[in-house]
Amino acid sequence: MSDLKPLIRLTKFRLDDMRRLLAQLHAESDMLRRAIADHDAEVVREREVARENTESRLVFGAYLRRMSDRRDQLMAAVRDVEIRIATATDELAEIFMEQKRLEIVEQNRIDEERREVARKETQVLDETGAIAHLRRKAGRI
């Protein structure tokens, strides 16, 4: 039987890589959400300025359209990252299940080898006992 430890080690590396990727994706998502919050706060500030300043009111409509487009871009980026997170999470689950299957198969192999060793030891001890018994019996006759 072949040793599965190298394959198990490889899946652990793949799991670690996928966890790192997920952490990066979550950080990117958080950054984009902060950018959206900052964007919305800026629009509120500019709206206040436009209420107080006649010149600002004249260009506020164009500013608002541009900022709306920018917000749409940020939201699209968030949706893209969320899709990537979902895909990476699914892949992480698959790798984890593969690792568990390999670990179970490896443990079953180890258990089988131990049972085989114990069976052989028992067989040797039984044969030794039988020979000793026959020698004692032969000596009494």
Image: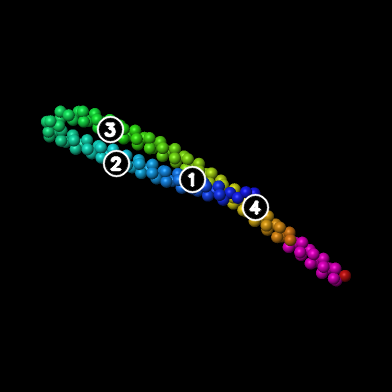
**Disc 4 crowd, CA 10 A, few/some/many (<14, 14-19, 20+):** few
Assign a secondary structure to mark 1.
helix
Residue count near mark 1 (Cα–Cα under 10 Å), binned few <14, some 14–19, many ≥20 = some
Q: Label for residue 70?
A: 3
- Residue receiving disc 2: 34
Name the secondary structure under disc 3: helix
**Which of marks 1 and 4 precedes in the sequence?**
1
**Residue 127 percent coordinates (x, y):** 77, 61
Q: Quadrant of residue 125?
A: bottom right
Q: Residue furthest bottom?
A: 140
Numbered circle sitting on residue 112: 4
Res 14 label: 1
Specify the amino acid type for callout 2.
Arg
Q: Is residue 27 left or right of residue 114?
A: left
Find the distance from the CA under tag 3 to the CA under tag 2. Answer: 14 Å
In front of the other: label 4 or label 1?
Answer: 1
Of the two numbered discs 1 and 2 in the rendering, the one whose residue sits closer to the viewer: 1
User: Was residue 52 drawn as part of the magenta stretch in this picture?
Assistant: no
Task: Check if mark 1's residue and mark 3's residue have beta carbons within 8 Å.
Answer: no
Query: What is the spatial separation of the Cα atoms under label 3 and label 4, in whole angstroms?
Result: 63 Å
Image: magenta residue range: 125-140
**Quarter-of-image position of residue 128:** bottom right
Front-lying residue, 104 or 80 = 80
**Could one spot residue 24 in this view of the protein?**
yes
Which callout, 3 or 2, points at the residue further toward the start of the chain?
2
3 vs 4, front mark: 3
